[in-house]
Amino acid sequence: MKLLLFVLFVYTYATSAQYRQAMEDLNDDNFGQTLLETIQMHIQSDEPVGNLINMLQNLQSQVEKVQYKADEQHKRITTNCNINLDQLNDQINNYKIKSVTLKSYIDNLNPNVKQSVATVERKQKELDDYKQELKQAAEKREKEHNTYATILDNLEQALFGFHQIKLAFNQFIDSVQKGQRKFESFVEMKQVLKQVKHTYKLEGYKHIVQMLQSLSKQTSEEEALKLAIQLSAILKQIESYIQTERTREDQAELARETAYNDYKAQIADLFNEASKSLTEMTGILDSQSNELKLSENEKKEADVRLQNKMKEFDNIQAECSILDQEYQQQNRQRNQQSKLLDQAILLTTTSLGQLKSDLLKHAEVY
């Protein structure tokens, strides 16, 4: 008997404690207060208690249905979010790898392009130098040829003049030897020499003039004839000298022309070789430059897409986070509502009398 009383006491105390806790929970929540007001309205009416319990159970069922739908929707949203974020993360990683790979390739290609540019510039300068060398050689050759032509013209005129002098001199000597002229008139020969201007610069001319002066002063025909013979020998020497100089100048001119042609051919070969090398290097440079430009453009495009995908990732992540927070908040609210409905049903089914009494007292207060 004592044991039964103790169990009854404990049950009554536990029930009383549950009741007080349930009332506190309902009064501390807006939804709970609404439930209490609804229960109060039903109690004040003559409707059966079963209707009240059914209504509360229907509300509980609706909350559970809403919770089930919310859970299913949250699962779908979470799955879609994870799928989208995983896909975006894979794309971001791929673009990062592509960007890093392209940067490494560009960094390796840049020195090659710079080296090719330097090579092309060096080859172009080499071609310009060859052109300048050919130009200078042509100018030098033109000056040499002009000098040669001038010397040759002088020698030709000198030779022509000496032929005239020699012819006149021989004719004069012949006429003197035949007694047709006198040595006193030999001064006329000096005038003939003066008419040939180019002869003034030739070796032996001064000696010729001196001999002519001696001949003009001679009174002895024997001495005069002796000097005339010496003068004739000098004229032959000068004629030989002119011929020798002409031959030497011709040979020198031929040697210069041959050397110039050989040099020009050598420079032409070097020029053609350098030009061919320049064409090849220009082609390589163009290819490298195009490849570099394409790689730089491709990297820029990859970087832009990477930034866009990262922004898209952040936006989706933020949106999914907001949806999850909303779900968690609503889930807590529904759990609270479900808990309060359980307590309201419990109070209605187990402590209706006390609940009715408390609610009526509450109504009288207000």
Image (cartoon, rainbow, N blue to C red):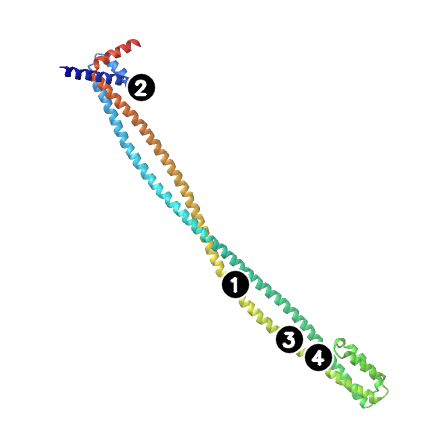
* Structural crowding at the residue carrying mark 3, measured as other residues with C-alpha within 10 Å and reported as few (<14), some (14–19) or many (≥20): few
Alpha-carbon distance for marks 3 and 2? 125 Å
**Residue at mark 4:** 242
Alpha-carbon distance for marks 2 and 1? 94 Å
- Label 2 vs 1, first from the N-terminus: 2
Report whether residue 51 is seen. Answer: no
**Which disc, if any, is residue 138?**
none
**Residue at mark 1:** 275
- Label 3 vs 2, first from the N-terminus: 2
Which residue is found at the position 75% from the left and 75% from the top? 201
Which residue is found at the position 50% from the left and 62% from the top? 277
- When the figure is inspected, residue 122 is found, relative to residue 351, above or below; the finding is below
Residue 108 in the image: state x and y as whole percent. Answer: 45, 53
- Please state which of the two labelled residues, at mark 2 or mark 1, is closer to the viewer: 2
Callout 3: helix, strand or loop? helix
Callout 2: helix, strand or loop? helix
Alpha-carbon distance for marks 3 and 4? 15 Å
Callout 1: helix, strand or loop? helix
Three-letter code, disc 1: Ser
Residue located farthest toward the right when viewing the structure as drawn? 219
**Residue at mark 2:** 30
Q: Quadrant of residue 225?
A: bottom right
**Residue at mark 3:** 252
Alpha-carbon distance for marks 4 and 1? 47 Å
